[in-house]
Image: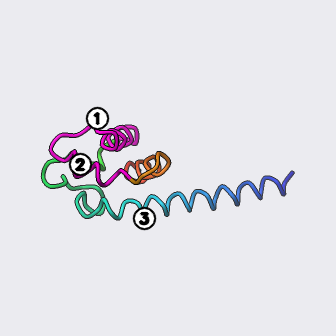
């Protein structure tokens, strides 16, 4: 039983690190406009994303992707998120909202 718990703990630890690393990697593209910590209003028009909840970020990114969200930056953001999977959107949202 101990071996199973240790194995699960190790696997979970590797997955968590991998997910965190993926969030960091995904955010690199965002940081150019939103700032290294998500502290900037992109192009002086967006919300400060570091202040958004994970659920708000997911809703916004999926909305940009399907064209149902956004105003002035709608076209720019659609191009940024089109290649992201739902899992990547969730990972990115967790990274930003931490």
The image position of residue 19, as x and y in percent, is 53, 57
- Disc 3 target residue: 25
Residue shown at 82% from the left, 54% from the top: 4
Residue shown at 23% from the left, 48% from the top: 48
Q: Which mark is residue 48?
A: 2
Residue 77 located left or right of residue 83: left
Mark nearer the N terminus (1 vs 3): 3
Placement of 14 over or under 86, stated as above or below:
below
Q: Residues within 10 Å of mark 1 (few under 14, many from 20)?
A: few
The image position of residue 61, as x and y in percent, is 34, 44
Q: Residues within 10 Å of mark 3 (few under 14, many from 20)?
A: few
Under circle 3, the secondary element is helix
Q: How is the rendered protein coloured?
A: rainbow
Name the one closer to the observer, 77 or 55: 77
Q: Which contiguous range is marked in magenta?
A: 53-82
Decide whether residue 71 is among the magenta residues: yes
Residue shown at 58% from the left, 57% from the top: 16
Of circles 2 and 1, the one toward us is: 1
- Disc 1 target residue: 68
Mark nearer the N terminus (2 vs 1): 2
Of circles 2 and 3, the one toward us is: 3
The image position of residue 18, as x and y in percent, is 56, 62
Residue shown at 21% from the left, 55% from the top: 40
The CA distance from mark 1 to mark 3 is: 26 Å
Instruction: Verify CB contact (< 8 Å) between mark 2 and mark 3.
Output: no
Of circles 1 and 3, the one toward us is: 1
Under circle 1, the secondary element is loop
Quarter where residue 59 is shown: top left
Mark nearer the N terminus (2 vs 3): 3
């Amino acid at each position: 039983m101990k071996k199973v718990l240790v194995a699960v703990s190790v696997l979970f630890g590797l997955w968590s690190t991998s997910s965190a690393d993926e969030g960091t990697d995904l955010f690199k593209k965002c940081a150019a406009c939103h700032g290294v910590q998500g502290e900037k209003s992109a192009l002086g028009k967006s919300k400060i994303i570091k202040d958004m909840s994970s659920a708000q970020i997911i809703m916004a990114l999926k909305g940009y992707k399907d064209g149902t969200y956004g105003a002035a930056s709608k076209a720019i953001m659609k191009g940024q998120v089109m290649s992201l999977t739902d899992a990547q959107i969730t990972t990115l949202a967790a990274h930003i909202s931490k």
